[in-house]
Image: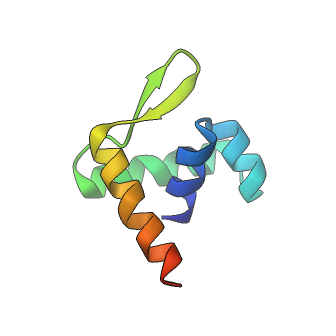
C-alpha cells in the first residue's frame, strides 16, 4: 500500500521509486501485482503521467485511512 500511495501522490513511477529508494522496475512489479490481486487497474497512463482510475481513487482513500490510523 505504501508503494501504491507514493505512486498515486507522485503520478510517476520514476519519481516515486526515487523517493522510496527502490528500483523503478521493482515498484512497477509491486503495483502490477496489487492490481492483479484486486482485479482492476489502479492507474491509467495519460501522456507521461500515471493517473488514478476511479477504483484507484477509492483504494487511495482507504490507504489514507489506514495510514492516518497508524496501520
Snapshot colouring? rainbow
In the foreground, 11 or 13: 11
Against 58, is 25 above or below? above
Using residue 41 as the reference point, say whether residue 6 is left or right of it. right
Judged from this view, the residue extending furthest toward the bottom is 70
In the image, residue 61 above or below residue 44: below
Closer to the camera in the image, 66 or 23? 66
- Identity of the residue drawn at 42% across and 71% down: 65
Residue at 25 percent across and 44 percent down: it is: 40
Direction left: furthest residue: 39
Corner quadrant of residue 24: top right
Residue at the (46%, 32%) spot, across then down: 51
Q: Residue at x 42, y 46 (%)?
A: 32
For the view shown, which residue lies furthest in the top direction? 47
- x and y percentages locating residue 46 in the rendered image: 47, 19
How many marks overall?
0
Relative to 44, 21 lies left or right: right
Q: Position of residue 4 (x, y in %)?
A: 50, 54
55 left or right of 27?
Answer: left
Q: Where does the image place residue 5, in percent across and percent down from the top left?
A: 53, 56
Q: Position of residue 41 (x, y in %)?
A: 31, 40
Q: Is residue 63 left or right of residue 21?
A: left
Amino acid at each position: 500500500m505504501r508503494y501504491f500511495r507514493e505512486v498515486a501522490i507522485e503520478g510517476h513511477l520514476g519519481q516515486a521509486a526515487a523517493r522510496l529508494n527502490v528500483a523503478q522496475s521493482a515498484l512497477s512489479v509491486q503495483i502490477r501485482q496489487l492490481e492483479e490481486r484486486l482485479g482492476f487497474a489502479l492507474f491509467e497512463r495519460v501522456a507521461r503521467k500515471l493517473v488514478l482510475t476511479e477504483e484507484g481513487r477509492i483504494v487511495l482513500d482507504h490507504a489514507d485511512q489506514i495510514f492516518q490510523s497508524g496501520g
